Amino acid sequence: MTSTRSSTSVRRRIAWIASVFLASALAATGPLRADDANPRGAEPATDENMPSAAEFETFASASTIDDEAARSVVRAIRQLVVDTGAGQIRELECNEVLTLAARPVVALEFFRETFVTLPAALRTEGSGLATYFAKLRRAVQLMAARAKQTPESRTAVAYFRLAEVRLNVLSKSAITVPAARAAATALRSNAVVAALPDDAWREFLVECFGVARSDGDRAWVDWMGDELQFYAKRHPEDLPFVRSACEFDISRGEEFIETDPKGAGPVLVRGLNGLGAEGVLTPENLALTKRLNRGITVAKIAGFSPTVGYRTRTIWSAGNYVRADVPIGGDWKAEEADGDQEEWSLGRIGDHGPGATVTVWKYKTSTDYVDEEGKVVGGDNIGARLKRSMNDWRAQVARVKKISPTIGRLSKSIAGTRGFEVRGKDDLKDEFRVREWYWRSELWPMYVFNVVVLQTGGNLDRDPEMDKFLETFHETPKEK
């Protein structure tokens, strides 16, 4: 640990340089006095040595000490904060702060250091940092009141505004989002002048990220998401940060998609496209893979179309006659099929879409089957089975919404399917949609297959997981 004597030496160095700098200006302007009239509606002076706006303007214009001398103060303050940890910056006099604020180039470096070293300063100063910030705030008000503004002076003010935001984040105080957004925008518009250290900005965003996850303020969450993505685009090699930024977008997009689809939808899509980009998501990261897939489902149900697709796994029927792909981490559950006529029985809980069941039956073409009423139906008689099944479903509809005796093919990989759709409400007024397809297999010519898809609840017109299942539905070739 550095000794108190060392910190005292640094403190004396600051005071000496500041007094020399101040003396050069006072020789031309006379003593600075307290400001009784607030410039531009500013807060009252926090110290008796604080000048009026006019006096500060004269003081700043008359200073003759070169910038390098003032930079020595900045370096000394950094040493006081970071190296000694003595907790003495609160004792800096207002005139010492004004010497730094008077020169835009130096003010920029000073307030940038204030932002960068703030976590260390908070650890050493504790609650006493509020007194120090009151002096800085008054100096910034005087800077902002000057008639002539430069890129350096505007950027210096922006750095202090962000330092205030950072202090509030770390001390869990109220945060003013418009000020934070305006300050960040000002830094980006003067990026060359600002010379924002990437590591400090990343550290700040991580601090904000924790607040944004637990804070319900929509404006703060939106700004935080934009800042995370801005950094992620500049640093695509920082994969942990990129993933966190994308996951944050996905979370806030899902949260607001129902109440504000126009605002939340593009945010959700941005997060999904970023997380699904090449090289960002590894197969080993199962939790984020599930996050991606769930977000895609939510986005598509809401009517948005991310460019990335589901990460899927292939599942097979009981006898391995057919297969299909489902999103990893989805709610699909296979039930035991009898392996005779019933080839596959799947169910899916409708947390992010309609509830659904899929059943696959197979019938031997050389066998005659007797139904519950004693009627004989040949295994290859697709027409009779199609008509009988559609009439059975029609009988369960208390209120018909749609009956289609013919529908499109089951999937691109299976030719010659015939199907129907029945849609309506049952006796309990629950809406359902059922589709069935029949076809004689080319790979297994001794069988006729029947797929039954039943969906209930939710948006029956938008079920992207089911669409993926049907799109990838294939017959499985015989093993040689």
Image: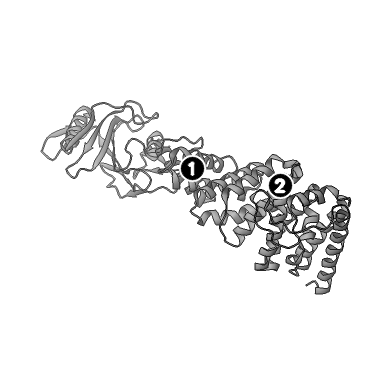
Rendered location of residue 265, percent (x, y): 47, 39
Q: Residue furthest left?
A: 374
Q: Quadrant of the C terminus?
A: top left
Note whether residue 238 is visible.
Answer: yes
Gap in angstroms between the C-alphas marked 1 and 2:
56 Å
Q: Quadrant of the N terminus?
A: bottom right
Q: Along the polypeptide, which appears first: circle 1 or circle 2? A: 2
| Image vertical order of residue 257 relative to residue 446, above or below | below
466 lies left or right of 159: left
Q: Which one is in front, 49 or 318?
A: 49
Note whether residue 380 is visible.
Answer: no
CB contact under 8 Å: marks 1 and 2 = no
Q: Secondary structure at mark 1?
A: loop
Query: Where does label 2 land, which residue?
Result: 145
- The residue sitting at 83% across, 66% down in the picture is 10
Q: Amino acid at mark 1?
A: Arg
Rendered location of residue 301, percent (x, y): 39, 39
Label of residue 147 in the image: none
Query: Where does label 1 land, which residue?
Result: 311
